[in-house]
Image (cartoon, helix red, strand yellow):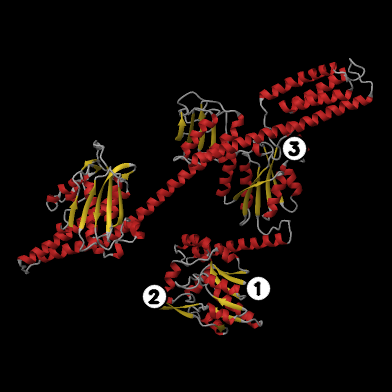
Amino acid sequence: MARGTLRIFLGSAPGVGKTYAMLREGHRLREGGEDVVVAFARDRGRSDTRALLAGLELIPAKRVPYQRLHLEELDLDAVIRRGPATAIVDDYAHANPPDSPNAHRWEDVDELLDAGINVLTTLDIQHLASLSDVVSAITDVRPVESVPDEIARRAGQIQLVDISPELLRQRLADGRIVAADRVDAALANYYRPGNLAALRELALLWLADRVDEGLARYRTGNGIEASWPARERIVVGLPGGPEGEILIRRGARILNRVNGGDLLAVHVRAADTAAAESPQELESQRRLVHDLGGSYHLVAGEDPAAALLDFARSVNATQIVVGIPRSGGLAGLLAGLRGGHTGARVVRGAGAIDVHIVSQQSEGGSPGVPRRRDLGRARVTLGFLMAVLLPVLLQFLLAVSPDKNVATAVLIQLTGSVAVALVGGLWPAILAALWSSLLVNYFSTPPLGTLHISDSRNVLTLLVFVGVSAAVATVVDVSARRSKEAALARAEAATLADLSRGAAGSEDTIAGLLQQALDVFQVRGAALLSRPDDGASRAGAGAKTGAAAGQGEGWRLVASAGEVPGSGPGSGEIPGNGILHGDNVEQIDATTCLVLSGRVLAASDRRLLGAFGVHLLAQLERRQLLASRSEVLKLAESNTMRTSILRAVSHDLRTPLAGIKLAVGGLRQEGVRYTPEEERELLATIEDCSDRLEVLVGNLLDMSRLTSDSIKPLLRPVRWYEVIPGGLHGITPDRVRVELPANMPEVEADEGMLERVIANIVENAVKYAPGSDIVLAGSAGGLGPATVSGRPAGELRVIDHGTGIPADRVVDMFRPFQRLDDATQATGVGLGLAVAKGFTEAMGGRLTAEATPGGGLTMVISLPLSSGIPFRAEPGQAPLQPQSEVIGRLHAPPLLASGTDPV
């Protein structure tokens, strides 16, 4: 059985007419003789939709019970039994009720398609999974239902149902979308003109991407390689040097002239041009492309021009931007021998694709012409010496040899030229070939002893000898250089692999990278510097050596290893005027540079130094992202805390204040006489409400101090029995039993904080374990496994035998404003355990929860054992006053609230 075809009617917002268009298509198919049924659709109170439904066969929806309701849902089995040619199923993103065979309606539709039934359905752009966060940011409404994009892309046809925002708002105002009493709210919120315009653009762009995918499949399936300019798409060829930034910006300016399009930057990595690449420049250009809204691509190919053209055709590019250097001399000659520069070869092979040639003074070498890597001064010098001496030595051997024909002499001297090429490269080998030809002519070609050649065949022999020697020398030179480049590349790859592994294993990846730089480059110091971004262009942010690497005030040391550059001898220093000098200064971008001191690096180390810089920049950006994420989380937590505190102030604090006001008003009421018992009851009410208010305010203030990181505990040796009485103040004595061993050692704690921790935990146990005794038991610590941050710890256990708490709720229990099982707000604002945990961790301890054997909950306070040396208070730091010292003054003026300093 062939699988059915899915057709989606896509809309930018509810009310654009998706269901109406779908039902009209159903009528058209039915009039054409096709078997069409409505499997599930709703009229939503719209008369025109109801009229279209009346003309089609309708399969009754099944009623599903859900929380005292009966929901109408798609009857999948009934539709499959009916077996129509086409089924109309509204609301593709709908989430089915719990316990349904499928969680989502799109899964029901998939079963219909598997049964060979064609399906017409509707979908809003907000329900696409990849766009739900974007829609939420635009409309401030988070979609609760979604469809994975890959599922929607499987549709055989996607039809956009589109109307202008103005017409949609008019339909809404006419009451054709929502009820009349909801029109004003809808117009002022979700259906604002800006929202609708943005949603419409999202729908158009998403559908345009799907059209591009379909076009690409068609061209691939039909073997069409020619570019079809269906959409402006500009490909920028990056040669790997600083000139790539100019090309990117030129491509962006070209794209800005049209309304919409894509910018794709491509770097082709070839074996013979890899050495000319600048890692930091490519990284800088990758970030620039992303900032401009484009994409960066890296492809491999032996011929950069052919690879660039293949990529452009694969993405259906309309224009290519490529650079060509203003170079002459040997570089131009070599490029001409190779068929021209990359830009020229792209022009010849572009076909129907427009090519923009940007003339530039190349700083990184000519594109398409490999940068020759120097074999080293020592090898070249040795090669020239061999070119002079080795032919003479070989000619001397020929002189003592009995075989003195020209062919033998040519072969032996050719061997010498190859040896010279292996050692010194091309130019020493050319010199050796010319010198050898003169020696062969003088000593081995008749007439001997002169440079005159009597036999014309010997002239040809010598010319062939010189030509073959030059050709062989060229091949050997190229092979030797390639071999050296490959060895250097392997060494660089191994170094970078070790670099990544070492940095990954380091707690501070930036410090780990700098420490490795000391070993790799054999320097005494390495430092990473940064300065604020002053808006300078990135054009000068490439690698700069041998002179001032950057200018501007405000260079700041981010991290260093070894000697800090400028504090000792070395090539990199940081003068007081803010200018970086030295051969070992590698400017990674406009605001970041890497400085080494202790040794001047060779030119061959520059590429590896650039790779180090790119790694450091990535780690620095990662650190900044983590810091930003931490700040965002803190802000979100602060906003949540602020909202919760406002809610607590508006409700939870009002309750005890109302009780106080009512009792005081009753006592002051004239003409009413109370008995002594009634007066005592009213005064007790005032006292109870005041105590409750004191606890609420204290916890709110403590939580505020914790979230603002203003808690500074004054640690000193504390014994448990010194703080437990203050922590149990106000608790009914017959509910609590203290069982401390006699040998419990001192712990390091802030006495006032520890009292507050014990008080909050015990109050929580009394509140949620009614009828159960609360036991405070201790362990000596230091003799068993109890440790905190690797140090022996003393423990206090607060044990109850109440209902306990499920394991999956333990983490939530310590969060602010949490109440077990939605306890009434009269029991508090849900800050007790959060404050207790925060205070314990501020003292370097740990607060955990575990199940009590036989049922209940045990809270474990673990604090490091005291070393016997109290911490000295910082200037202006006052200890949190112990509860035991203020018990007698709680109700005496001036009032001292728990958790505050004396005023």
Does 632 sit above or below residue 390? below
Residue 189, position in %: x, y?
44, 66
Residue 741, position in %: x, y?
20, 47
Residue 193, position in %: x, y?
49, 65
- What type is the residue that disc 2 sits on? Gln
Return the disc, 2 or 1, that comes first in the chain's sequence: 1
The label on residue 45 is none
Which image quadrant: the N terminus?
Answer: bottom right
Does 617 sit above or below residue 28? above
Within-10-Å neighbours for mark 2: few <14, some 14–19, many 20+? few
Q: Does the residue at mark 3 contact the one at mark 1 (Cβ under 8 Å)?
A: no
The label on residue 2 is 1
Residue extending farthest right: 455
Say what secondary structure mark 3 lies in.
helix
Q: Is residue 329 visible in the rendered structure shown here? A: no
Q: Which mark lies nearer to you, 3 or 2?
A: 2
Q: Residue at x 65, y 63 (%)?
A: 214
Within-10-Å neighbours for mark 1: few <14, some 14–19, many 20+? few
Q: Camera-side residue: 7 or 198?
A: 7
Q: Which residue is mark 3?
A: 335
State the image quarter where residue 788 is shown. Answer: top left
In the displayed structure image, the side of residue 286 where residue 511 appears, left or right: left
